[in-house]
Image (cartoon, rainbow, N blue to C red):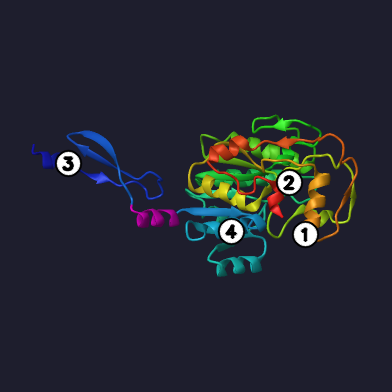
Amino acid sequence: MPLASRFQPPEFPDPVQTMPSLKVTVNDKTTRVNVLLSPEQKGIQSMNQNLVMSGYGWLAGYVGNALSGKLNIIGTSRSPEKCFTLKAQGIEGVQYALGDDTSILCSHLPNATLLLNIPPGRRNTDLAVFTQNMLGLIDAAITASVAHIVFISTTSVYGDTTNDVLAEDSATQPQTASAKAHVTIENYLLSKRGQIDVSIVRLAGLVGPDRHPARSLSGRQLDAGNKRINLVHVSDVVSALTTIICDTPLNDVIHLCSLSHPKRGEYYVDAAHAMKIDAPHFSDTEAEPAGKVIDATQSWARLNITPEYSDPYRMF
């Protein structure tokens, strides 16, 4: 039989694959050949990928701005007005509150990345329903063939009674209802590795151009001035999330935190003076430094990122 008659046309891969290739069969032997995409083709490929952000709040707004034009972004909100505003920004808004029917939301999830950033609410102390609904949303996303779930967690999972330096694999000791809920959700997601890609991102105290704890502490009388602070700037968080979403999923837990940890009785007073607001007053500032230290050194190295705000004194 002539060679041409035994040649089978190449099978083109699904466009959502991140490493495009051709599978070619000649003389009953199959081989896979990588295909180099032009920058224009890569851009088209990225724009075919959905990033669904469940809980399109303050942080999601920064992430959405950074990834606009790079991914097809869908954001959820409980408010129809907010969904309309998102549409004006080029983002598809989906009206959704945790516990609602997930059908419309899940229609966007096949082969997508789902960023879970739904806070439990500061005043909510009974979080059984919140946790159950979060686990239900995760199950629905997996059933809908989501590719990657990124969960925004918190360093409060370590509690507030230790003076240790805490790495990503340190034991959690949640004390509050919110922290306990986050640990439950983290563990559930990690148990799903193998079915989907999972990235757990534990954030320290979040700071941004329009958000700094010194403002809420202004003029207050507070104790434990010797406790060390753990903060992270939203700009560095966005850099990390961009890498996690657009490059390689972690399938692990990381910390996002600055690399220095001054005493809060010194730092917040200095920050208030720089902002020209009334400074808080702390007791025990002269005592030896105490409190947990969130060590994010390995996480930043793993992401190949040098945080712009590694020093909290650059955050004001």
Looking at the image, residue 38 sits to the left or right of residue 49; the answer is left
**Cα distance between the residues tagged 2 and 4:** 23 Å
Mark 1 Cα within 10 Å, few/some/many (few <14, many 20+)?
Answer: few
Query: Distance between the Cα atoms at labels 3 and 1?
Result: 72 Å
The three-letter code of the residue at mark 4 reads: Gly
Q: Residue 134, labelled with which disc? A: none
Pointer 2 residue: 129
Q: Of circles 2 and 4, which is in front?
A: 4
Residue 131 occupies which quadrant of the picture? top right
Residue at (39% x, 57% y) in the render? 44
Label 3: few (<14), some or many (≥20) within 10 Å? some
Q: What residue type is labelled 3?
A: Phe
Give the distance between the C-alpha atoms of the residues marked 1 and 4, in whole angstroms: 33 Å
Q: Mark 1 or 4 closer to N-term?
A: 4
State the extent of the magenta-drawn residues as a range.
38-48
Q: Marks 2 and 3, Cα distance to the nearest angstrom?
A: 58 Å
Residue situated in front as seen by the camera: 44 or 79: 44
Image location (x, y in percent) of residue 79 = 67, 64
Horizontal arrangement in the rendering, residue 282 relative to residue 175 (left or right): right
Pointer 4 residue: 75
Regarding mark 4 in the picture, which secondary structure is present there? strand
Using the numbered discs, state the Cα–Cα distance from disc 2 to disc 1 in whole angstroms. 40 Å
Q: Which mark is residue 275?
A: 1
Q: Which residue is drawn at 49% across and 45% down?
A: 145
